[in-house]
Amino acid sequence: MFTVRTLAAACAWLCVCAPALAAAAAVAQAPKAEVIHWWTSGGESAAVKQVAQAYRDAGGVWIDTAIAGGDQSRAVTINRIVGGNPPTAAQFNTSKQFLDVIEAGMLNNVDKVARAQNWDQMLPEPIVDVIKVDGHYYAVPLNIHMQTWFWYSKAAFKKAGIEKEPESMGEFFAALDKLKAAGIIPLAHGGQSWQETVLFSAILANMGGKELYLKAMRDRDQATLLGPDFRKVMLAFKRLKSYVDAGSPGRNWNDATALVISGKAGFQVMGDWAKGEFTNARQIAGQHYGCMAGFNAATPYLIQGDVFVFPQTDSAQAVRAQQLLAKVVSQPDLQVTFSKLKGSIPVRTDVNAAELDVCARKGIEIMKDRGRQAGVTEVYLTPDQNGAMQDVLTAYWNTNMPVEKAQKSIANALKY
Amino acid sequence: MSDTALQAAPMTFDTAPAARRKRRLSPARIGVYAFLFSAALYFLLPLYVMIITSFKSMDEIRSGNVFALPLFATVEPWQNAWRQVSGGFWNSVAITVPSTIIPILLGAINGYALSFWKPRGANLLFGVLLAGAFIPVQVMIYPLVWMMARAGVFGSLPAIVLVHVIFGMPIMTLLFRNYYASVPHELFQAARIDGGGFWRIFGQVMLPMSLPIIVVAAIMQVTGVWNDYILGLVFAGRDNAPMTVQLNNVINTTTGTRLYNVNMAATILTAAVPLAIYFFSGRWFVRGIAAGAVKG
Amino acid sequence: MPAFRVNKVTPHIALLPMALTVLVAYIGAALWTFKTSFTASRTFASDNFIGAAQYVRLFDNERWLLSLHNLAVYGVCFIIACMVLGFLLAAFIDQNVSGEGFLRTVFLYPYAMSFIATGLVWQWMLAPGAGIEGAVQSLGFTSFRFDWIIDQELVIYTIVIAAVWQASGLVMAMMLAGLRGVDPEIYKAARLDGIPAWRVYLQIVLPMLGPTVATVFLLLCTAVVKLYDAVVAMTGGGPGTASEVPAKFIMDHLFLRSNIGLASAGAVTLLIPVLALLAPYAYARSRRKRA
């Protein structure tokens, strides 16, 4: 029977439960994002924790799924998309790795965020080319890595009597000779096929300049690939083999950096993630080691980096989570913090770079010159084409393959 | 210390009684020990390197000799490793237990049916199954993902168990089939005459006498499932990720720094379970196969 | 009689899981792979049929051809080394040595460890300069060379060394068990006849282990075809592409290179010689059974 007491009880119940229900509803509404990525080592995981924190501060819930190894991580992402259980966001490299996924219609676009932040103007051209397909934006870039920095040990330079950084290929070979004469390994190299491709890209960029580089790698122009300028680059590349020590095959890149750190080797050509190793060994840029982005101002700055893509989903909650993540990641403050911990540079140039180290600041300055921006080979080539070229380069490096055959094989590989 | 007669085997065997060989230190005997000693060196060398590396600091590893003992031993890598891989321990257990029991059970049933009942077409089926054992696991991932997605089970514990059942079936069936092939057929006939049906004979006669081969199969399957990485990564789903996925996260990295000492410690920790099983059941392992498992 | 009929049907029902596994999982996957090998599938399976173009590309690919060659070399060396070493270990342990339990564990433990880290350890040990070469040289043998792992021709043998390390313990265990099943009277009789021990083992005991040897051989063959972890951990397929193996080629193209069409063609090509070897073996076994 409806007595006053019952009514009062009902009101009391409602007053107690309503806020709880509202809170529960609010929590249920908080955008939940499961993110698959491969940032598992020290500096990387510290960096991704910053992203997670920023996402939480913006009201979202971050679910972390870290899977070490880029190809493993991407394989899981692809398999989960096929399996109907996609993550909210997944990490890929700034490259053609996710082009197939876009073309299969399996990614949500982030046009809203892109247009609001004017990505066409703000982002470097190589990045826009990769994330914008058919007028839609399918990925949000997190950072920029440069693949072909020249790292050198100041102690080794001193011992070999090298007084300044080389400013041309000729000076570079001269420096290598000096190091060899002083009994130091001139070039620390890890003999894995991707590292050989990095070395080759460095020579192509420094010797051939932006034009030759783009003609060969972006346009895949057969005439250029079979031409005399490309041949010179390949010969210079092979010439470097004589400056590398016998133990290089199979060596991990960190072990090569270790040689530079200890002064046993002079140079290493590696991406800016190498800074992490120097920092771990308590060495300071400009003091113990030096960094060169290229021999002179004509060298293109080869961009790669990481992006988040957003697998296709119709769930309104998931879409909201995706949009929020895209927005959070593009904030300048987070960009700086992330890059600082990861060793990269932010995607935007309108950031306060004071916190970043000497080499990163150098990189940001160079990035302001849009004329120097180019992408690494993976930005222009499909994984298959890049892989096929890698196979040729590593075979050329390791065997007595004549340069003509190598050139023809590369031209062939990039024809498919 | 040599193994003596096995309890439940259809045939007894025993190693030569101690009186067989007089313990003279003849040249032949010295040769035996010399050979075994050098072989042991070859086998133990990597373990030695792993252990000393796991107690060194990264600075020492970077600048030091692979074989040198640590100058300043530290347990920090072990603490670090334990912190990172221990989370997946129970997941691994949750995956390994059903992924060992079910394939063994099915292998036993298959082997039993193939050996004694020989239904039509079974041998052909077995032949195809054996051919399947040669297919690299990765090749089957895509179609299996697709099939599981259609069945709605992808990314869950049942999915990974099912996958392990599929991949374990060829070897398990082979082991049991060969084991039962060495069991005297008269035993089976007698049981049939006594009125036993398919399941009766299996449950009351064959299964009890299969203990040795079950131990063998369990050891092989536990090792395979516990150390599996790629299948657990793809099929188990995020919440069921086994210890090996975490091990990979510790060891593998594309552009990050590599902590070799932690890697070694983590590997030893992850291998601890199969190693313990070997250590404690090594005798059964040899005995089990002795009972005719491998007599083709 | 109902019991009779039930007994006829029950085995078939009991084998249902096996039938399902074979038909749905194995044959289904094999058919899918076969179909995909004729398409231009990249990251995802597509229906873009291009005939045998993937196969043409496959056999035009030096890395693939080299991987087949490596597999043959590796397969022969690995199987022979494992079986010889396994048998020797088993035979020697069978000689009533003290510490048998300890020795058995020593030889078996590599099988328990994942190759990701143990492969790296082998890489360190076989690296020229450091590793074994360096250690022996520092002992005074300054002209000692052991740099196979950076040699284009010899690197595949370093993989054999590490893989034998991992697998021969299992072979030893199986052989030992087989040996334990040999009638001890044979040894007594042989000694009375004055036959030296090594001849007993080689000419009398080994033939008796025929079935054991056959099963071990089969298991080792499956391991050879699936070789992947060791190569990735030790050499990454290098130097260059010198230690490439088919399973790695397939895996690289499945995920890293996003070219499942080519990977499928490789998988199909890999399976055919396996079937070619397996069929006569199965045929011989069925003949023997009937006999």
Image (spheres, coloured by chain):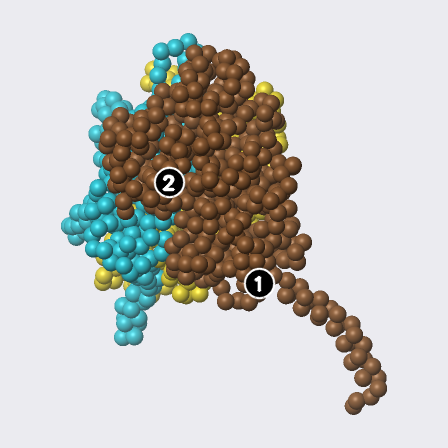
Chain colours: A brown, B yellow, C cyan
Residue shown at the point (65%, 36%) measured from the top left = A354
Question: Which label's residue is closer to the chain start, 1 or 2?
Answer: 2
Residue A277 visible to an observer of this rendering: yes
Residue B26 is left or right of residue A269, and the answer is: left
- Residue B167: percent from the left, percent from the top? 37, 52
Chain under callout 1 = A
Q: What amino acid is labelled 2 in the image?
A: Leu
Label 2 Cα crowd, 10 Å radius (few <14 / some 14-19 / many 20+): many
> Does dot 2 land on a helix, a strand or a loop?
helix
Q: Dividing the picture into quarters, in which one does residue B59 lie?
A: top right
Q: Amino acid at mark 1?
A: Arg
Measure the alpha-carbon separation of dots 1 and 2.
38 Å
Determine the residue located farthest toward the right in the rendered image: A4
Residue positioned 43% across, 20% down in the render: A171
Residue for badge 2: A214
Q: Is residue B90 above or below residue A311?
A: above
| Tally of numbered discs | 2
Residue tagged 1: A320
